[in-house]
Image (cartoon, rainbow, N blue to C red):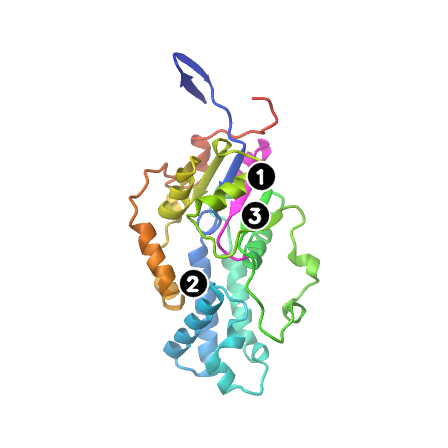
């Protein structure tokens, strides 16, 4: 690939770092969440006999309390379940619901087509591969390991985890030794608490952390207003994962009903969406289209 400087065509310098969103950019997070949550929810209703609409209200409250729609200790904190089974360990009573969730997760957590080979090609060029997600650390860590991307990513940047319920230890809920839940090769860094996309300062801090400059990076994400606009505000080359759009799918309505978003966050989203939509390089069908537009290479190859 070449660029014109004056009247001379010279080789473009390759990009030395790819920074990519994870959810709905590398895999279909919305579909995964809907399959896992809806299957678990149906089992909870079946076992408890509690009105589904009442449960949804309680779930939304718990999700908002902890700032995530993936709260791992949801069942233990639902008032209706605690009231109906006051002398039982809820994890035991609702183990079929938890098992159903995990089975759906194993079945539906898959990369989009072409993602794996594209990331490996970029990694093989000598460029850094970096993930930046708003999903909390435990869930991001699990998905990266399950998808076989530990070591493909040089860094993962995510918010830290929520607190665990009082009286419960991490060891009480883990099925494997602590080392099983840790990256072997990828470095996991936490973003500042409460700082969300499209905060340009967070992206700038990530780029500084990986010892790169905005001009050396390419950023990819599925949100025009959060991912693409943020990258453009910092002067980072960018691409919109248009194929990952999920806001108009049937399952998204269930997510809205139990979402962790508070009214303050809804108002913030409205402000973000009120901005003019940025012009974007669209990856319409697959992640691999990225390679049609950008060349990647090592920062140390002297190019």
- Quarter in which the C terminus is drawn: top right
Specify whether 13 is left or right of 241. right
Say whether residue 127 is magenta: yes
Judge by depth and name the residue closer to the eye, 170 or 104: 170
- Residue located at (45% from left, 55% from top): 29
Judge by depth and name the residue closer to the eye, 103 or 204: 204
Q: Residues within 10 Å of mark 3 (few under 14, many from 20)?
A: many
Q: Secondary structure at mark 2?
A: helix
Q: Secondary structure at mark 3?
A: strand
Q: Residues within 10 Å of mark 1 (few under 14, many from 20)?
A: some
Quarter residue 286 falls in: top left
Please report whichever mark, 3 or 2, sits nearer to the chain's N-terminal start.
Answer: 2
- Residue located at (47% from left, 22% from top): 12
Give how far across and how far down residue 287 sits, in percent.
Answer: 45, 41
Q: CA distance from mark 1 to mark 3?
A: 11 Å
Please report whichever mark, 1 or 3, sits nearer to the chain's N-terminal start.
Answer: 3
Say whether residue 150 is magenta: no
Q: Is residue 251 visible?
A: no
Q: What residue is pinned by disc 3?
A: 156
Q: Which mark is residue 34?
A: 2
Residue range in magenta is: 117-136
Give how far across and how far down residue 82 sits, in percent.
Answer: 51, 83
- Residue located at (67% from left, 49% from top): 184
Q: Which mark is residue 192?
A: none
Q: What residue is pinned by disc 1?
A: 210
- Quarter in which the N terminus is drawn: top left
Q: Residues within 10 Å of mark 2 (few under 14, many from 20)?
A: some
User: Which mark's residue is nearer the viewer, 1 or 3?
Assistant: 1
Mark 2 and mark 3 in contact (Cβ < 8 Å)?
no
């Amino acid at each position: 690939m070449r660029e014109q400087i004056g009247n001379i065509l010279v080789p473009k310098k390759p990009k030395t770092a790819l920074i990519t969103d994870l959810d709905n950019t590398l895999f279909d997070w919305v579909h995964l969440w809907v399959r896992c949550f809806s299957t678990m929810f149906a089992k909870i209703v079946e076992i408890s006999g509690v009105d589904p609409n009442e449960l949804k209200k309680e779930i939304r409250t718990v999700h908002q309390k902890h700032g995530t729609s993936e709260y791992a200790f949801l069942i233990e904190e639902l008032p209706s379940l605690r009231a109906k089974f006051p002398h039982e360990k809820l994890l035991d009573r609702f183990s079929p619901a938890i098992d159903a969730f995990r089975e759906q997760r194993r079945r539906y957590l898959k990369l989009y087509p072409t993602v794996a080979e594209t990331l490996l090609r970029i990694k093989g060029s000598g460029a850094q591969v970096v993930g930046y997600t708003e999903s909390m650390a435990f869930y991001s860590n699990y998905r990266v390991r399950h998808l076989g991307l530990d070591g493909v990513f040089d860094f993962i940047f995510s918010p830290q985890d929520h607190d665990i319920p009082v009286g419960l230890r991490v060891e009480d809920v883990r099925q494997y030794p602590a080392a099983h839940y840790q990256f072997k090769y990828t470095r996991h860094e936490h973003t500042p608490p409460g700082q969300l996309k499209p905060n340009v300062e967070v992206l700038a801090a990530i780029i500084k952390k990986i010892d790169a400059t905005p001009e050396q990076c390419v950023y990819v994400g599925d949100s025009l207003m959060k991912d693409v606009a943020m990258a453009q505000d910092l002067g980072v080359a960018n691409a919109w994962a248009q194929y990952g759009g999920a806001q108009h799918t049937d399952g998204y309505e269930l997510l809205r009903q139990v979402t962790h978003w508070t009214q303050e966050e809804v108002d913030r989203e409205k402000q973000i969406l009120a901005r003019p939509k940025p012009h974007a390089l669209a990856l319409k069908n697959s992640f691999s289209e990225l390679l049609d537009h950008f060349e990647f290479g090592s920062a140390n190859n002297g190019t």
